[in-house]
Amino acid sequence: MHFELFADYFQFYLQDDDINVGNVSDAWTPDATQRLRIAVVPSAIAVGTARNDTVSVDVEVLNTSPSMEIDAWEHVVEADLAIQTGRIVVAGCTDYFPGAARLNVPSGVYRVRVLYGDRHSAADSAGDRLSYRVQLWPTTSPSAVSVVKQGPVPWAG
């Protein structure tokens, strides 16, 4: 599914539909901000963006782990996301939560791969324009957050 999300505060969210489980504010550590580019709590992932503006996001819900086709992407990171309600909310961080987009999925733990790419400078000096792809698949083997491919640090200009 394709989304155009307002990445207010330089982020957008993937989280369980239970609004009470998704506070990532304390997860934005210096490492999360610069190296990982995502902030993670068990039922929410905030994806850091290069712009405080509308961003293009493609989300794929898959049955199994996809092939590791990452050459075209600048930065790739993976983390786990626990979904108890069977609904994943995809939203900008200041979107009206009840009106945000939802994806229906079986409850469980998902591995999430976030890919950052297609960088080009913006004429408005508000930060580089990047596109984002998110791939999710069920997992029975929880894993730590990991950088699969490290992009440049500092990464947003």
Image: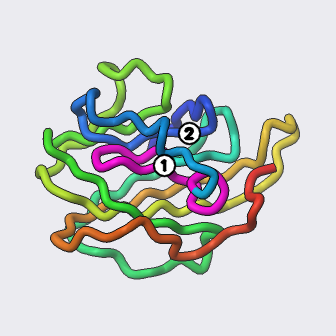
Secondary structure state at the residue bearing disc 1: strand
Q: Which residue is mark 1?
A: 39
Q: Are marks 2 and 1 in contact (CB under 8 Å)?
A: yes
Image-based side of 117 in relation to 22, left or right: right
Q: Residue at x 68, y 69 (%)?
A: 151
Q: CA distance from mark 2 to mark 1?
A: 9 Å
Left or right side of 101 for 4: right
Q: Position of residue 130 (x, y in %)?
A: 66, 52
* 83 displayed left or right of 98: left
Q: Is residue 107 above or below residue 6?
A: below
Question: How many numbered circles does the render carry?
Answer: 2
The x and y percentages for residue 56 are 56, 45
Amino acid on which disc 1 is placed: Ala
The part of the image, by quadrant, that contains residue 79 is: bottom left
Q: Position of residue 89 (x, y in %)?
A: 32, 37
- Start-end of magenta stretch: 32-46
Q: In the rendered image, which residue does mark 2 sit on?
A: 11
35 within the magenta span: yes
Residue 1 in sight from this viewpoint: no
Q: Which mark is residue 77?
A: none
Q: Residue at x 56, y 31 (%)?
A: 6
Instruction: Label 2, secondary structure: give it.
Output: strand
Where residue 40 sits: x, y (%)?
42, 50
Residue at screen point 19% across, 43% down: 104
Q: Given this view, does label 2 or label 1 mark the residue nearer the observer?
A: 1
